[in-house]
Image (cartoon, rainbow, N blue to C red):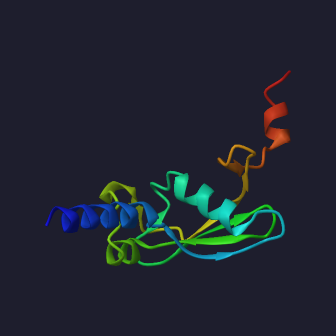
Amino acid sequence: MKLMLTLGFLTSVFYAQSQTITHSLHIGNKYTNEQLTNAVNNANWCGYIHEFENYKIVFDDGAEVLLKSQKQALNDGINLKGNCIQSVKVASKHVYSIAKNGIIVIRAERDLKKANSFKQ
């Protein structure tokens, strides 16, 4: 009986750690499937999860990642916080990249005309 409980516990721990927030990946020419998966799963996507649709993010090498919707995550046993769910945007306008340490970096454009207008 103890052996069965131990095996059940180990299986549930493995299952909990193997859950992923990505729905699908389209690999580009710079990052591997493993790099993308690890970076996306280690990031905090609170506010990026859509209620019913997949949220699309695009990386600098052309890779595309679709995050699971709230409905898909719940079907897979992933419990997301309710205040992290949004229902407006389904894609990001930013371009993402993965730093050497595996952290996702959001590349945002800077309006130089606006920044220089304050220097006089």
Q: Residue at x 13, y 67 (%)?
A: 1
The vertical placement of 45 against 21, above or below, is above
Picture coordinates of residue 103, whole percent (x, y): 65, 47
Residue 15 locus on image (x, y percent)? 38, 67
**Quadrant of the rendered structure where residue 97 is?**
bottom right
Asked whether 22 or 33 is in front, the reply is: 33
Q: Which of 50 and 19 is in front in this view?
A: 19
Quadrant of the drawing holding the C terminus: top right
Q: Which of 8 and 18 is in front in this view?
A: 8
The reply, left or right, for residue 38 in relation to residue 32 is left
Judge whether 16 appears above or below 56 on screen: above
Q: Along the line of sight, which residue is nearer the eye, 38 or 89? A: 38
Q: How many marks?
A: 0
23 left or right, relative to 27: left
Residue at the image point whose x is 84% and y is 69% from the top: 29
Instruction: Report the side of 98 relative to 65 (left or right).
Output: right
Can residue 74 be seen here? The reply is yes
Residue 96's place in the image compared with 74, above or below, is above
Pinpoint residue 28: horizontal percent, then vertical percent: 79, 71
Percent across and percent down for residue 119 are: 83, 23
Looking at the image, which residue sits at the far left? 1
Q: Which residue corresponds to the image point at 82% horizontal and 63% vertical from the top-left?
A: 30
Is residue 93 at all visible to an observer of this figure? no
Q: Outermost residue toward the top?
A: 120
